[in-house]
């Protein structure tokens, strides 16, 4: 028994040294603040608008038969907006739908900001979708006949170091009230 223990001792020491090297001697990564710094609320809103426009551009490039085209939309979203886009695009792709036309913002207006250190922004948006059509696998339009040509939305963004603008879109919902969309 003493012979077995004496043969295992070097193995145990080697394992302890390896564990110490892998854990105790590895420097901790530096903490970085993921919140972009804007010099003013106006600059933060301008970057948020740029984010929304990039998102719409990505939407206009989506080919429902090619899931790779969804990735750019996903890159501009997080949270609920990302989850909803993934679910919707996956279903449309599975159902063999096609999309044609482009949407374009007709109004993007700051709605609110998240305090002195701007980490959340809301934009009131009017999005012209009159030229966009969705067609199912049988060639039938799935767009409601009473769909308004201009969608009225509230876009919620959060600060992020994942995009070049410093923002990602967290939520998209319908809105009422001012500013009015024409």
Image (spheres, grey):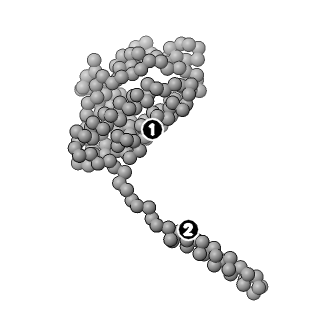
Judging from the image, what secondary structure is the residue with disc 1 in?
helix
- Disc 1 from disc 2: Cα separation: 34 Å
- On the image, numbered disc 2 is attached to which residue? 22
Residue 32: in sight, yes or no? Answer: yes
Density class for disc 1 (Cα within 10 Å; few <14, some 14-19, many ≥20) is some
The answer to whether residue 30 is above or below residue 113 is below
How many labels, in total? 2
Q: What residue lies at 47% left-to-right and 18% top-to-bottom?
A: 100
First-in-chain label (1 vs 2): 2
- The image position of residue 53, as x and y in percent, is 35, 30
Query: Where's the N terminus, which quadrant?
Result: bottom right
The answer to whether residue 30 is above or below residue 93 is below
**Which residue is nearer to you in this view: 134 or 41?**
41
Q: What residue lies at 28% left-to-right and 25% top-to-bottom?
A: 107
- On the image, numbered disc 1 is attached to which residue? 75
Q: What residue lies at 52% left-to-right and 25% top-to-bottom?
A: 63
Residue 175: in sight, yes or no? Answer: no
The answer to whether residue 72 is above or below residue 181 is below
Q: Are marks 1 and 2 in contact (CB under 8 Å)?
A: no
Q: Is residue 2 left or right of residue 159?
A: right
**Which residue is nearer to you in this view: 127 or 56?**
56
Quarter of the figure with residue 40: top left
- The image position of residue 127, as x and y in percent, is 34, 23
Q: What residue lies at 51% left-to-right and 71% top-to-bottom?
A: 24
- The image position of residue 81, as x and y in percent, is 43, 36
The answer to whether residue 174 is above or below residue 27 is above
């Amino acid at each position: 028994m003493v012979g077995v223990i004496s043969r295992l001792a070097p193995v145990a020491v080697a394992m302890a040294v390896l564990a110490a090297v892998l854990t105790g001697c590895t420097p901790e990564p530096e903490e970085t603040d993921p919140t972009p710094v804007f010099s003013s609320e106006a600059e933060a809103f301008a970057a948020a608008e740029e984010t929304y426009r990039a998102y719409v551009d990505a939407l206009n490039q989506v080919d429902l038969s090619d899931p790779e085209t969804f990735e750019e939309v996903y890159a501009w979203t997080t949270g609920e907006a990302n989850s909803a886009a993934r679910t919707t695009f996956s279903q449309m792709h599975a159902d063999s739908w096609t999309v044609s036309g482009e949407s374009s913002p007709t109004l993007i207006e700051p709605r609110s900001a998240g305090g002195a250190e701007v980490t959340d922004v809301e934009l009131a948006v009017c999005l012209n979708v009159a030229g966009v059509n969705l067609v199912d696998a049988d060639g039938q339009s799935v767009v409601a006949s009473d769909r308004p040509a201009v969608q009225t939305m509230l876009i919620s963004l959060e600060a992020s170091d994942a995009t070049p603008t410093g923002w990602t879109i967290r939520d998209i919902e319908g809105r009422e009230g001012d500013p009015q969309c024409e």
